[in-house]
Image (cartoon, rainbow, N blue to C red):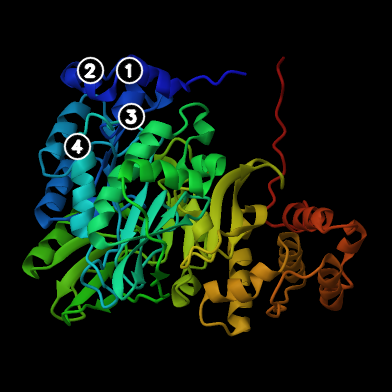
Amino acid sequence: MENKLNKRERYKAKLKPIDYYKDFENIDFESLTEGDRYYLQDFGIFNVEFLEDEFTIRIRIPGGRISAEQFQAIADIVSEYNLTIILTARAGIQLHGIEVDDILEIHKRINALGVSTWQSFGDNVRNIVTDAYDGCGKYAQIEVYPIVMEMHDYIIKNPRYVGMLPRRVSIGISGNRANVTSFFANDIYFALAKKDGIFGFNVYLGGKNTEVAQSANIFLATDEVFDFFKAFVEAFYLHGSRFSRAKTRIFHMIEDIGMDGMRAHIKTEYKKDFEDAGELILERAEFSEFHELKDKSFGFCYQTDFSRLTASEIKDIASFATKSRAEIRFGIDQNIYIIGLSEASTTLKSPAISNTIVACAGNLCPYAVWSIKDETSYLPLDKINEHLIQVGFSGCAKGCGRHRHTDIGLIGLKTNNFGDTDGGARIFLGAEHSSGASVGRQLFSMVPFVHLESVVSLAIKLFELSGYKNFEEYASKVLNNYSEEFLSLWFLANLETGNSFELSARDEIGSFEYEKELLKKEFFELDFWEHVDENFHNAVSYLSKKLWTIEGEDPHYKPKIERTSFR
């Protein structure tokens, strides 16, 4: 079948987004068409047909750096219009609950502050991110903020690229030897590296929320990054697929033509030979609430309420930063960093324990079915915080909570597998996220929310018993050397018996027979064995339903309501 442009590309072919903007003042926001909604995303405005009177604005904060004055001005807008404000997992800001009569005025006021809403949604280079401690932390080697701004300025309002890329592009760059959060979920990641005694960057391509970026075997000196960036964007603009939306990301382009093909397209625009990759300089480090900086001052991590903020909070943070002559930065962990404190103390009090948890917008987004930020209450937050376990919580499979790039990943979904339709979460474990070695693997396709704490607590208990210093190392040495179905059954059997039998480290994944013998050693008396044949699949299904749906035995089970039919 002949390939056809996808629907969004057909709109672009009729009218470029930059030309659409010429009549921006005259848009009838009460009567938007499908095309209007596509175009508005390129200027930071999001709206869906079934919530036609409610709008979202996303604000780019390149490198996560914002002045106290800008932050306070945004808070004033939030307060004046009674909006909801959250930080995004790309170190930006989203304003929710904007009424149709106010959207144009708010859009104007924000863009007059020295920040921008342009190209924060849609088929664009999205907000460019780096580490919150860029240039100042004790792990900082190369300050990349000047490069971030060079890339940002090149893209913003560039008529060739505004809304005209085949799909969104996420870019991460870090000149730090260790980072608060991993950047391997980006379409392109410039990672600190060293070659021939010179620090620069290795290039990784093709990451997304469910995949890790792979080495392109390219090393760049600091002054080469911007030219490479321009070549990369142009190559994607010229050669990226514009057909099925499901196959238009950089990941799929590399899948189609290979990394060598991708390199060749970029090289054509770069017009220079590439140097092979250098030595990746990337350590794993734990970051505490206060972090000593290179100049002996301190950075403070203000833990948000899972990215939610209030206008009064912002006022307090902006006021404190001004009085302390400190800098405000956003992290991609949805927290706020106050940089340059004279001592490791502050009058600010974080409202939540959230420094290692990323949660998507939840019910503020039309794609999520639950209020994901509230569902964090089902998690053993104290234990997660004690061990600094990285958790990603997404409201749908799109993965804005980066659930497959964390120690424990969750997708909030609906299920009727255990009775009436209710909330639940798909669980992933064991991403080797710091090095970009692998994404997390699925442990359970669905766990009812009311049982979520017991499952996650068991995962943490088994980690504690292992003696490893962090969950990622435990996953690498233990979890990831057993099959997914074996781990599912091992967890269920421990839950049924109330035990916490630990697993030993292995160098490779064992055979089915080996795993079966391990289960027999500890759980021979359980009744799931009649469901074990050539794999553990049926046994997992049987035991999960037995534990979570048996009427009369499960105190959380809700019997189906009898309804009268009048038809």
Residue at 26 percent of width and 72 percent of height: 141
- In this rendering, the answer to whether 471 lies above or below 484 is below
Displayed quadrant of residue 42: top left
Kindly report which numbered mark, 4 or 3, lies closer to the viewer in this rendering. 3
Residue at 52 percent of width and 19 percent of height: 4
Instruction: Give the percent coordinates (x, y) of residue 323.
Output: 7, 67
- Residue 368 is labelled as none
Q: Are marks 3 and 2 in contact (CB under 8 Å)?
A: no
Mark 2 = which residue?
27
Mark 4 = which residue?
81
Q: Nearer the viewer, residue 157 or 407?
A: 157
Distance from Cα at disc 4 to Cα at disc 2: 21 Å
Distance from Cα at disc 4 to Cα at disc 1: 22 Å
Q: Upstream in the sequence, badge 3 or badge 2?
A: 2
Instruction: Give the percent coordinates (x, y) of residue 229.
Output: 30, 48
Distance from Cα at disc 2 to Cα at disc 1: 8 Å
Q: Upstream in the sequence, badge 3 or badge 1?
A: 1
Three-letter amino acid code at the position of disc 3: Met
Q: Upstream in the sequence, badge 4 or badge 3?
A: 4
* Quadrant (top left, top right, bottom left, bottom right) of the N terminus: top right
Q: Are marks 2 and 1 in contact (CB under 8 Å)?
A: yes
Three-letter amino acid code at the position of disc 1: Leu
Residue 320 in view: yes
Mark 3 = which residue?
164
Judge the density around disc 4: few (<14), some (14-19), many (≥20) Cα neighbours within 10 Å.
Answer: few
In this rendering, position of residue 419 left or right of residue 154: right
Mark 1 = which residue?
32
Judge the density around disc 3: few (<14), some (14-19), many (≥20) Cα neighbours within 10 Å.
Answer: many
Distance from Cα at disc 3 to Cα at disc 2: 21 Å
